[in-house]
Amino acid sequence: MERLQKIIANSGYCSRRKAEELIEKGKVSVNGEIITDLGTKANNSDTIIVDGNKIETQNKEYILLYKPRGIVTTTKDDKGRKTVMDLIETKNRLYPVGRLDYDTSGLLLLTNDGELTNLLIHPKNEIQKLYIAKIDEAVNPQTIKKLLSGVIIDGQKTKADRVKIKKLDRRKNKTIIEIVIHEGKYHQVKRMFEQIGYHVESLKREKFAFLDLKGLNSGEYRHLTTKEVKILYSLAK
Ligand code: URA
């Protein structure tokens, strides 16, 4: 048995706070009975309706996928392209935690735990993501430092938490840069580099919080352990 607001938030319908508001407003019923008491508990076999929508309660599943390039991070694609869901076998309805671009590879989490998803993608929780960006130019190390003091994206100052040049090959005109960010704005890393005059040729996410891609080849996935899920919750709260 779990508190109603937690079950609603876990389903991904809305945040726990919003669920509490909806309960207090009399918008939630359990097995046909309107509930307004925030202490009410229910379980997965109860029928929970919020504002006319049935809440799907499934067992929680957490997947860590090594997304290849050339795959879209959606559950369905209008253009019929391969999606991350095509790489995963599951009976559950999973959703990606944030997104990676079609041409970005690397670590992507997928889950049906809406509460954890909301916590992980909220910028205030500052979950760090580490990317490796390849640039077909020999970059100026001073210019790269501007990413630490911040560039303007979507009208907001956006800073990298860490930037490190891993390899700078002046002869071949190539640079490999490690960059850590904690927000998830659309095309964030590519746009941050554009702001300082560099085009990202390829991008890979190597870490999401403490999780990495060890033991996985491109296109492979594994389930998170209970301990890993617990740590993600503790980092985000
Ligand atoms: N930043 C980007 O520009 N693209 C991604 O896929 C992820 C972060």
Image (cartoon, rainbow, N blue to C red):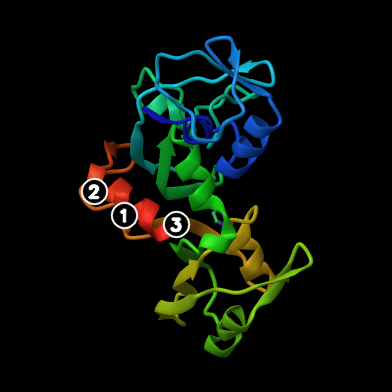
Q: Which mark is residue 236?
A: 3
Residue 149 position within the rendered picture, expressed as x and y whole percent measured from the top left? 62, 83
Q: At 56% from the left edge and 85% from the top edge, which residue is drawn? A: 145
25 lies left or right of 35 = right
Work out how far the residue at label 2 is from the one at label 3, CA to CA, in angstroms: 14 Å
Give amino acid for label 1: Ile
Give the residue number, with chain letter if any, for mark 1.
231
Disc 2 crowd, CA 10 A, few/some/many (<14, 14-19, 20+): few
**Residue in the picture at 53% in, 68% down:** 136
Looking at marks 2 and 3 on the same chain, the residue that comes earlier in the sequence is marked by: 2
Q: Secondary structure at mark 3?
A: helix
Report, in whole angstroms, how far the alpha carbon at label 2 lies from the one at label 1. Answer: 6 Å
39 vs 232: above or below: above
Q: Position of residue 7 (x, y in %)?
A: 47, 30
Residue position marked by numbered label 2 in the rendering: 227
- Whether residue 183 is visible, yes or no, is no
Q: Residue at x 23, y 53 (%)?
A: 214
Percent across and percent down for residue 88 are: 36, 27
User: Can you name the residue that lies furthest to the right here?
Assistant: 155
Q: Which mark is residue 205?
A: none
Mark 2 residue type = Lys
Front residue of 202 and 222 = 222
Q: Are marks 2 and 1 in contact (CB under 8 Å)?
A: yes
Q: Residue at x 58, y 13 (%)?
A: 33
Give above or below for 171 relative to 34.
below
